[in-house]
Structure formats: C-alpha cells, structure tokens
Image (spheres, rainbow, N blue to C red):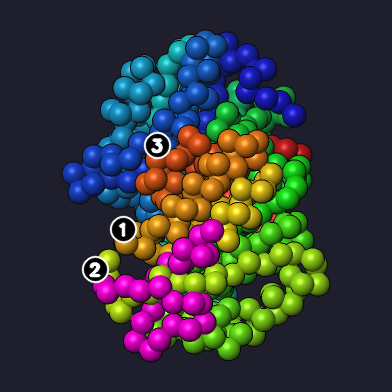
C-alpha cells in the first residue's frame, strides 16, 4: 500500500479529501479549527514536496447550494494556516473548477466549494416529496447513482494522486471519500497522516491487543451502544458499562432507580448482555454507588446512594466514590484501554467527577505503558475539558467512524485505499 511519507508529490496535483466540517458562529467565524489543523501535516507535506493540492470537504448537511454551508467562509483561515494563498472554486464540479485545478503550480492550493452541494456526493436523491411512490423513489435513486459516476470522475480528473485524510467520514461510501479511489492507480492513492494515525489506533484496539484490555462504555442509551458492546464482548477482558446505561441494567436486575434515565424495553437485552459476558469470561463491571440529584440540574440537591437503592424522586447523574475507586483500580491495571462515553452528566460541573476519575486513571495507566484510545463525541469533550488529552495515547477525531470501526464494520473510506 502506498504511504504519504514515501510518496513524492513534486510536480503532481493531489486531490485531498479532508474533514473541514468545522463549527461556525452566526457571523460565520470558526469557533473551533481543530479539524483544519489536523489536516495540515498532510497538506503541508504535499506543498513542500513541490506538489499542489485540490482540497475537497463537506460542511454541515446542506440539502443543496446554500450560503450558510459555503466553504468560502473558511477560505481565509485555511489560507492563513497553510501559509499559501488559496484559490476557491465556487462550484466543485464545474469546468471553472477543472480549469483552476489544471492551472495550479507547484506549492499552490485550491479549495473546492462544499462537495455536498451536489446530491451526487452522498449518492442520495433530494427533493423527493413525502408521498413519493416506491417507483419514484427507486427511479430517483437510480438517477443520482448514475450521475454520481460522472461527478466522481470529474473530481478525479483534477488530480494525479488521491489522498484521504477525512477519518470523520470514512464510514460513508461517498463520491469523494471512497468511490473516487477507483480512478487512481494503486501507487497514486493513500491515506493522509491523520487518517493513518486513526487507522493505526483502531488496528491496535481491534487486532493488536496487549492484555488486560478494558473498555469503558458510557453515555446515555444502551440502544445506541449495543452493537459496539456486542463486538467488544469478544475482545475485552473487562467491560465497564457506565453513564445513563447503568440504570437500565440496574432496574433489569431488580434495583430501584428512582427517576434515573432508563430504557425499559432494553431490560431483557441488559440481562442477556450480563449472561453473555459471563459465558465469554468477560468481567462486566457496573456501578456500585451513584451520585444522585433531586432534579436534572447542576444545582440540584445531591446525595450518594448505593446503586439499585435510589429513592423515589431522585435520579442518578454520576457514579459515586466507591465506583470511582472500583473503575480506577481496573483501569490502572490495564494494558489496553478504550473509553467511549462519560460516567455521568459531565456537562454539569457537579456531576463530572466520575468522568474525571476515569480520565485520570486512564492517564495514570498510560504513563505506566498502557495504550489508551479515547473516542466518540463526548469522551473527547471530557478529556479536553479535563486538560488530559496529552496524557493518553490517542484521541480520535472521528465520532461515528470510530464507533463503526469498533463495531467491527469495514469502513468504505479505508477499504477503498487498503484493497
Ligand atoms: P452518548 O451520546 O450516548 O454517548 O451519551 C452522552 C450523554 O449521556 C452526555 O450528554 C451525558 O450528559 C449523558 N448522560 C450520562 N450519564 C447520564 C445520566 N446518568 N443521566 C442522564 N444522562 C446521562
């Protein structure tokens, strides 16, 4: 497989798919440019080799062309960070874009307008009325799939090489994230540096495991984490199930949970998972105590209660001190650690202590030689909030993509390059 490190871009044009889906405020100012910065090593390597870059990205979920989702809002910042004057093509698949790409000189950059302004990027029909018949839906799907080929070919025609550095969309089989790879020879397509790091992190967690392996799965709902939990049961030694999910498990086992969050229809599933963990010899760890509140509010009255004995009118919003110690002991003895999802409502200062205890235990284990991967939305927010992102092995940038990889799915963006 080709690698970006080895590839010499001198005199070549590279189409680089990045994830510049950054948050913007109401004045279109970028409020967090982490994703742009994350792609800089790849873009700068190409430019400093004497190559030129055609940068493609999506922004938000537009339903067509829309000023709100235009990448022109970020052009100035991209130019500044890259340190080169970056041109802009206000229609990513136009003859004008092709002309601009063709006239790029070594060391120059072109940013394409939001790829998702075209339905062909995602390959999903748009504008179908709610009451469209099955035939109409299927005809529209066929039409967009067929024009998707032309769109993909057009994007590919701009460049000599294809680089995918957008792990955040690697779980999508879109034109620019996967299909485009077909139009490049094996030697001319590769992962960018960020993508390479993400792929290696997943590889370490899924296939190159130092034991004991502990996964900490938090968050609010069993239903959204079930596929991951099932896949992990075949891999981990210790599985900590925490956060809001705790109370579905607790109630299923006959515990009293007061007003705590609970998915009643997932109680059987919770019991099944407990049994399956037993069968597989996995040490399934649930909270033994909770920090409870008399309302869902940072300033609620609080108390600690044993798990499964939460009084009526109260709800568990975080783990208690005994559970913190229980989790920390297991985490500190681990050699591979995966953390997804907080232990409680970490957005409320008064219910973030459990998540902090987990983050600190992971940092201590990492210092001791463990490999730790933090990923999936909220645990990334947690580790950043606690200022511990430098104290773990890797913080993934890809929420949904990472979760699908941990579910054991093959990600189209990875498969397209790693044939
Ligand atoms: P998820 O998106 O499924 O990973 O869930 C993350 C969310 O779960 C965060 O916003 C937390 O505030 C929330 N959460 C964690 N623990 C609890 C809890 N005990 N009660 C209610 N929400 C919770």
Q: Secondary structure at mark 2?
A: loop
Depth check: give the residue in front, 415 or 326: 326
Inspect this view and state whether residue 288 appears.
yes
Q: Secondary structure at mark 1?
A: helix
Residue bearing mark 2:
299
Disc 3 from disc 1: Cα separation: 24 Å
Residue lying at the far left in this picture: please name it. 27
Q: Is mark 2 within 8 Å of ligand 1?
A: no
**Nearer the camera: disc 2 or disc 3:** 2
Quadrant, the N terminus = top right
Disc 1 from disc 2: Cα separation: 9 Å
Mark 3, Cα crowd under 10 Å, few <14 / some 14-19 / many 20+, is few
Disc with the residue nearer the chain's start (1 vs 2) = 2
Magenta span has 323? yes
Mark 1, Cα crowd under 10 Å, few <14 / some 14-19 / many 20+, is few
Quadrant, the C terminus = top right
Q: Are marks 1 and 2 in contact (CB under 8 Å)?
A: no
Task: Please provide percent x and percent y for residue 92.
Answer: 42, 37
Residue bearing mark 3:
34
Q: Is mark 3 within 8 Å of ligand 1?
A: no
Mark 2, Cα crowd under 10 Å, few <14 / some 14-19 / many 20+, is few
Q: Vertically, is 60 above or below 152?
A: below
Depth check: give the residue in front, 172 or 260: 260
Q: Which residues are magenta?
A: 299-325
Q: Are marks 2 and 3 in contact (CB under 8 Å)?
A: no
Q: Where, by quadrant of the figure, is residue 20 drawn?
A: top left
Residue in view at x 51 percent, y 77 percent: 307
Q: Vertically, is 354 above or below 88?
A: below
């Amino acid at each position: 497989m080709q690698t970006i490190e080895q590839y010499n871009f001198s005199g070549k044009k590279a189409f680089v798919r990045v994830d510049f889906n950054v948050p913007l405020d109401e004045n279109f100012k970028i409020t967090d440019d982490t994703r742009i910065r994350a792609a800089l090593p790849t873009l700068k390597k190409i430019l400093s080799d004497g190559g030129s870059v055609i940068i493609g990205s999506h922004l938000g979920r537009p339903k067509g062309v829309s000023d709100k989702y235009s990448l022109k809002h970020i052009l100035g910042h991209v130019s500044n960070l890259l340190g080169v004057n970056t041109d802009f093509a206000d229609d990513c698949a136009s003859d004008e874009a092709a002309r601009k790409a063709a006239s790029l000189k070594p060391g120059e950059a072109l940013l394409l307008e939001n790829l998702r302004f075209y339905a062909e990027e995602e390959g999903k029909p748009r504008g179908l009325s709610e009451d469209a018949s099955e035939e109409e839906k299927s005809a529209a799907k066929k039409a967009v799939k067929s024009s998707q080929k032309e769109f993909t070919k057009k994007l590919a025609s701009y460049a000599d090489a294809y680089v995918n550095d957008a792990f955040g969309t690697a779980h999508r089989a879109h034109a620019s994230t996967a299909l485009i790879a077909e139009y490049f020879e094996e030697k001319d397509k590769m992962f960018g540096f960020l993508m390479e790091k993400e792929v290696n992190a997943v590889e370490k967690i899924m296939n190159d495991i130092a034991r004991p392996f502990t996964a900490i799965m938090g968050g609010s709902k069993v239903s959204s984490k079930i596929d991951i939990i099932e896949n992990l049961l075949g891999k981990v030694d210790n599985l900590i199930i925490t956060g809001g999910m705790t109370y579905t498990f607790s109630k299923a086992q006959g515990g009293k949970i007061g007003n705590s969050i609970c998915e009643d229809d997932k109680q059987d599933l919770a019991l099944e998972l407990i049994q399956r963990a037993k069968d597989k010899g996995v040490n399934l760890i649930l909270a033994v105590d909770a920090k409870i509140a008399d309302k869902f509010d940072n300033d609620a009255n609080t108390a600690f209660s044993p798990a499964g004995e939460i009084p009526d009118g109260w709800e568990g919003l975080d783990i208690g001190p005994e559970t913190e110690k229980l989790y920390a002991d297991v985490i500190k003895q681990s050699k591979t650690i995966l953390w997804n999802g907080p232990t409680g409502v970490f957005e409320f200062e008064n219910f973030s202590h459990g998540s902090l205890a987990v983050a600190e235990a992971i940092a201590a284990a990492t210092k001791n030689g463990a490999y730790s991967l933090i990923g999936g939305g909220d645990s990334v927010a947690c580790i950043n909030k606690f200022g511990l992102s430098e104290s773990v092995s890797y913080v993934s940038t890809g929420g949904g993509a990472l979760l699908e990889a941990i579910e054991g799915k093959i990600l189209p963006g990875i498969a397209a390059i790693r044939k």
